[in-house]
Image (cartoon, coloured by chain):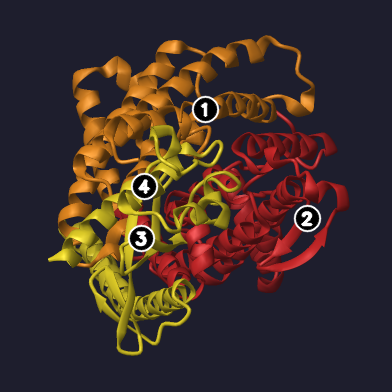
Amino acid sequence: MNDLFTIFIVMALVNNIVLAKFLGLCPFFGVSKKLSNAVSMGMAVTLVMLLASVATSVIYNYILVPFNVEFMEIVLYILVIASLVQIVELIIKRTNITLYNSLGIFLPLITTNCAVLGVTLINSSGDYTILQSIVSALGGGIGFTLVLIIMSGIREKLDVAETPPAMKGLPIAFITAALLALAFLGFNGLM
Amino acid sequence: MLERLKSKRFYPIVFLALIVLVSVSLLLYIDTFTSEVVEAQNKAKIQAVLESIFPELTDFEEDGDLFVIYEGDNITGYTFLASGNGYSGIISMLVGINTDYTIKDVAILSQTETPGLGSKITEKEFTGQFVGLTLDDIVLSGDGGSIDSITGATISSRAVTETIREKMAGIIEMLSE
Amino acid sequence: MEEETQEKNFKASQGKGSIFWKELVKGLVISNPVFILTLGLCPVLAVTNSIDNALGMGAGVIFVLLCSNIIISAIRKAIPPLVRIPVFIVVIATFVTILSLIFEAYLPPLHESLGIYLSLIVVNCIILGRAEVFASKNNVLYSIADAIGIGLGFTIALIMIALFREILGTGGLAVFGFKLFSIPVLSEHPMTFFISPPGAFLVIGLLMALFRWIGVIKGE
């Protein structure tokens, strides 16, 4: 599975990072009913994912592997991601204040988002080149945004439906996710 | 005294740098002896697998990814390490070939494919298909060859097949020189 | 703020020993990280597909939580507020790496099956959360109690979910190679759905609903 197209499809659909790899669940379950917010969140995460994948892939291929210091992976990756999120946050604040306000606390929380670190770890465990990492991040980000959009639409219906009290909120969201994950399993047939 | 130190402007950066320094040193130290253990384990594992592919082997010579298998003073075959990207991670394997460059056996060393589907590449039902094949036969049946993919695990099956074929081509070329 | 002072006074009036146990029990039930705080869910879904993975991850989280709570609590007075989050992150990342190196050398099959989720402990909101909320503000002894309590609560939750998924999904239970039991009809035709991703979501959703229905937690 080294060719770019397969990597993209697998990251976005077949092995969707949310529904199959369980990454990025916090923003997934916390997504608002407004479609525009879901899209903004998805795009923000995709951007950070892309930048982080490039940066970490460079570190992996030119520093970690050649100098035999793969054990520094976790510390370096998470510091890189934390810094990138700070920078992206600053840029968004300066260029689009409405976007900044609507994303709110979720922007700095992207640092602790398993999705970003998860994708960078998937890249290194697959020994991806920088190009492969970029495609992988694109697939991951788009898959993440797709699922966020779907969930955002469903949440609107969930809120007005008559759910039993014990199920209200997270439990019913999880069961919805189960059905979504089941549907996405169908993508296995693509391969 | 701590309060006076904390009020200095450079304190935060110095503190953080110190923490990172301690962290790196600690990790470097621990890595030196754990990586020795890991290497020893890998060696033992490879030796065990080599012996399962060539039960009568008396000795082997290592040359990068290639192992030359001896029975007494005669070369009885070769084994090479190959790894490629599967469905979810790297699949690494040892492939044994006879002196006439037909496959003796295939052993999967490590994989993280889907349990119950892609993980079936480790089973004899799949790997046994490679036994006796020449380089040109190593093609999936979907592409006109004789290797049947595992149902529902085409990517994993393809990954193994192509990885073996590519690496084997390189090894044969190297041996023929 | 008043709540905090009340809590401080209450703690001061109790003996040190009983506070230790109170903090510990708190993490197990009242503030159970998985079912109540719903923190750090990513690894939960991924590693509960087998009891081995659940136990391994649980032990790992307890180790990292304990070590990072101890260190952060020990140096809490010296940490400059400006860089406290990066400091927490580096400390936690260091211990996660140590855990990963130890597993790789001494427990290779566990290291292989946990995969990236082992490294992902570093972004587990539980550990960063405890560092920020507790360890940086309390002494070492209480921080140890907090770590053990929350860690055990997390592990027990993992085990509960894994029990369901493994028994229904494979028809039996095997702990580190030892077959504990095997249910007759189920083991020939296990409901592999439960080992798969949708099964994970379903089991946790149902368990959460169960906890709320029993009234252990106050519902939304």
Q: Is residue C34 above or below residue C50?
A: above
Q: From the top left corner, tell me how far across and down residue A111 is, in percent.
A: 36, 41
Which chain is painted in yellow?
Answer: B
- Residue assigned mark 4: B137
Q: Is residue C1 left or right of residue B76?
A: right
Q: Which residue is mark 1?
A: A189
Q: Nearer the viewer, residue A52 or C152?
A: A52
Give the side of residue A156 with respect to residue B62, left or right.
right
Disc 3 crowd rating (10 Å Cα; few below 14, some 14-19, many 20+) is some
Question: Can marks 1 and 3 be said to lie on one chain?
Answer: no
Task: Give residue C99's mark.
Answer: none
Label 4 sits on a secondary structure element that is helix
Write down the residue under mark 2: C172
Q: Which chain does tag 2 point to?
A: C
* Chain with colour orange in the figure: A
Residue position for label 3 = B102
Which chain does the numbered disc 3 sit on?
B
